[in-house]
Amino acid sequence: MVEVKLGSGELSRLLAEMNAAGGFPISILTDRHGFPIASAAAPGQDADRQSAVVALVQKTAIQVQEQLGMAQTDEISVYDANGQRLVCRPFKANEHDLILAVLVSDRNQSYRRLTTKAVQTIRRLWRL
């Protein structure tokens, strides 16, 4: 499990701001094993369940990388028939493997700029 030097409350606030700006119902920051570090969720959303799904998605991505000889994954998206998607953005922060996962409710909803900004902020905060 990753040890966080800054308060997870600060990370949760960052995720809540990203959710509000993007209209995301839930976002979660996990370590590479899917253990939750911080989350922000609308009422009725289950951060623990989402972190478990993120862990499964990450395991699948690692298997694909190893079997196909691919580089580290930049993004993994899982869509449902209604256009809702779970976006997982693996990244490193201060030598720790982390995953930012966001539930995007609408297939036409943009998310990349907001998640990139959040990843950059998390990397900056993690160095403190």
Image (cartoon, helix red, strand yellow):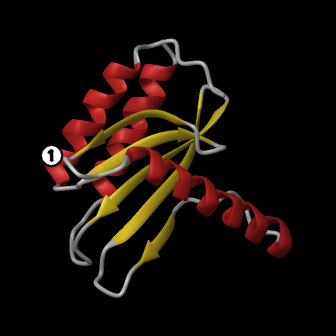
Which residue appears at 15% of the width and 48% of the height?
21
* Relative image position of residue 7 (x, y in whole percent): 40, 14
Q: What's under tag 1, amino acid-wise?
A: Ala
Question: Is 1 rendered above or below residue 51?
Answer: above
User: Residue reaching furthest bottom?
Assistant: 81
Is 42 left or right of 102, judged from the image as shown? left
Dot 1 crowding, Cα within 10 Å, few <14, some 14–19, many 20+? few
Q: Count how many numbered circles sit on residues in the image.
A: 1
Residue 98, image x, y percentages? 57, 40
Find residue 64 and report its image quarter.
bottom right
User: Left or right: 68 with respect to 92?
Assistant: right
- Please tell me which residue is depicted at 19% across the width and 37% down the height of the picture: 17
On the rendered structure, is 39 left or right of 13?
right
From this view, report whether residue 103 is shown above or below residue 96. below
Residue 63 at x, y = what percent? 78, 66
Task: Please state which of residues 71 and 1 is positioned toward the viewer in this rendering.
Answer: 1
Q: Which residue lies at the image location 22% right of the left edge and 73% below the top edge?
A: 106
Which residue is disc 1 drawn over?
20
Quadrant including the N terminus: top right
Q: In this orientation, which residue lies closer to the viewer: 81 or 75?
A: 81
User: Residue 93: horizontal and vertical position, in percent?
Assistant: 57, 31
Farthest residue in the front direction?
Answer: 44
Element at label 1: helix
